[in-house]
Amino acid sequence: MAHTSDVSVAEHDDGTGLKRSITGKQLFFYTLGDVLGSGIYVLIGLVAAAVGGAFWIAFAVGVSVAAITGTAYAELVTKYPQAAGSSLYVQKAFGNKALTFLVTVSFLAASFAASGSLAAGFASYFSELWAGPPALLVALVFVALLVLINYIGISESVVTNMVMTFVELSGLIIVLIIAAIHIGRGDADFETLTDISVSGNPALAVLAGVALSFFAMTGFENTANVAEETIDPHKAFPRSLVGGMIVAGTVYVLVSMAAALTVPTDELAKSEVALLEVVKQGILPFSTDLMVTIFTVIALVAITNTTLVTLVTQPRILYGMAREDVVPGVFAKIHPTRRSPWVGLLFSGLVVGALLIIGTLITEAGGKLDVVERLALVTVVFLLAIYALVIITCLKLRGQDEDERAFRANTPLLVVGLVGNLAILYWVIYDDPGSLLWCAGLLAVGGVLYLAEKLFGSRGTESTAGPLDREDREV
Amino acid sequence: MHVIVATDGSKQSLAAAKHLKAFADPAKITEVSVIAVIRPLAAVAFADELSEAEHQASWDSLSFREAAENAVAMIAATFDGWGPKVHQRVRSGSPANEIIKAAKQYDAGLVVVAAGGRGLSESVLVGSTAQRVQHYAPCPVLVVRPKPRPKKAKQS
């Protein structure tokens, strides 16, 4: 059965250029779609609350730090164009299985928390369309539907992905147009843009906002998912990844300025659907009700697109880990018809659902908790730590596996990015130590899976590497 | 005649390849192209259930392309010494689309696919890829259904 030698002679479709299928343009939109949906719709109000009218500064800083981190990813992806992303880079740099495991589980946890935050945000916007069902139910149904969509695989079309990205962008452009009209009429008060209304140290206020705004930039690391299938990755990745982030960042800064100019800051801060408040100001010369509905739908599409990508990432990570025998082998089970890792998908859906339920229970019990904010911060804690580590990894792997085509990120910038990531991380933990509890809880999920594999996993091990008659054939 | 044998990394696709070999006349087949299609945006872009005992990918170097190449190599190996020239090809995109495109491109005379599902869908449905290939392929299509008893299917 050993045909290792055949691998090297495997012939690709070179005659047709179909060897890989993701073009630079598609990668650009994939990045943009990933980043744009994640957060600006959900948490612009929270950032406004943290900083005041000048909250665009928080976005500008968050976006810059994230974009710098993006250059480190771009460099590493061009060196190691494989789907594993951060875990692979850390393993290459440190060769320490425990650390790699920790990074992978953290990444998984970040992804769970992000899905939860997005689902809760989805429910907020949904209530604008139909206030009937309770938010928790909407969020849970939303997650269940996305799991189903991923199981069936209809979200896999690159074209669908591009269309959804355009829809996301259109919502933000509507906000910009409204602001432009507002400014054109001379109604805008530009002093708002320099107003840091929160009491205390303005720098700290901005830093608090940065931490939240950072959530809006996350998602770009998922582009490593398609690294293997990108045509000419050495050129496409730096351009599309960094380009996508710069475009997203610019849009964010403009949108946050637009929101600050059109809606009083305290109104933004109070709203769960802050961007919708911009539309509700009735500045556009046609039916506000209609615009509100259209905009709500756009926001829902945007959030859906990003959540879909995060929900794809989780079973993928679990699949890889199951094959490595660090989590039970069932996560490597592939549905015979759909070819999707259905156990992993189901499990991810359950964890995200549990996060939402726990969050809601705490709120109902009188705890002061905003599910969206809490889960966003938990995501940010994990990702900031991973991003910082990836930048270190990038610097450490300098001089290894380099060829002249590899993209090279600017070193001084990377150092700035590293300091930035760590500063924000420090602030988040200092400001909100409670998020560490949630982080620990999510990490424990990884720990439990690891234990389950070690204690009961002998069967799982066999099923991964075993003979032809594995039990999943009978599924 | 150029025959395309598609694989999704499943054992059924291996059974399909063996089925072709069991009845087809190698003298009438000039070339065999074994094709795997990677789905870049899927959670698991390609799952190789054929050769994983030898090539175990791991979480820090998860390579779906490697998995696809290994699966293709495993299928290709069944045609070793059979006669026709065997090509190993890996494409990426939507499986049905890519298989149909390949059939057009190589001017194929036959496409061999596995029917897909077992279990609930076994008697009711053919897998969506097989179904779409069947509908839109420019040439005859052999859809190999799983044998009723799985334990026999892989022994054969």
Image (cartoon, helix red, strand yellow):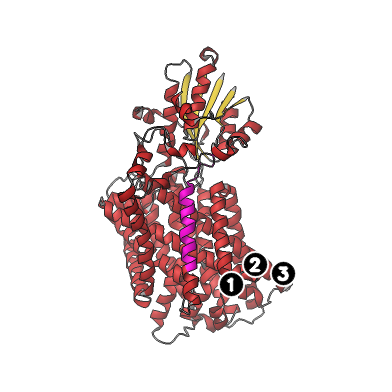
What is the span of residues highlighted in magenta in the rendered image? A337-357
Q: In the displayed image of the protein, which residue is found farthest to the bottom?
A: A199
Residue identifier under label 3: A290
- Mark 2 and mark 1 in contact (Cβ < 8 Å)? yes
Q: Is residue A246 above or below residue A262?
A: above
Report, in whole angstroms, how far the alpha carbon at label 3 lies from the one at label 2. 9 Å
- Few, some or many C-alpha atoms within 10 Å of disc 3 (few <14, some 14-19, many ≥20)? few
Q: Is residue A179 above or below residue A415?
A: below
Residue identifier under label 1: A275
Residue B138, position as x, y percentages in the image = 64, 28
Amino acid on which the number 3 mark rests in the picture: Leu
- The answer to whether residue B31 of the structure is visible from this angle is yes
The tag on residue A295 is 2
Q: Quadrant of residue A417?
A: bottom left
> Chain ID for label 1?
A
Residue A1, position as x, y percentages in the image = 36, 27
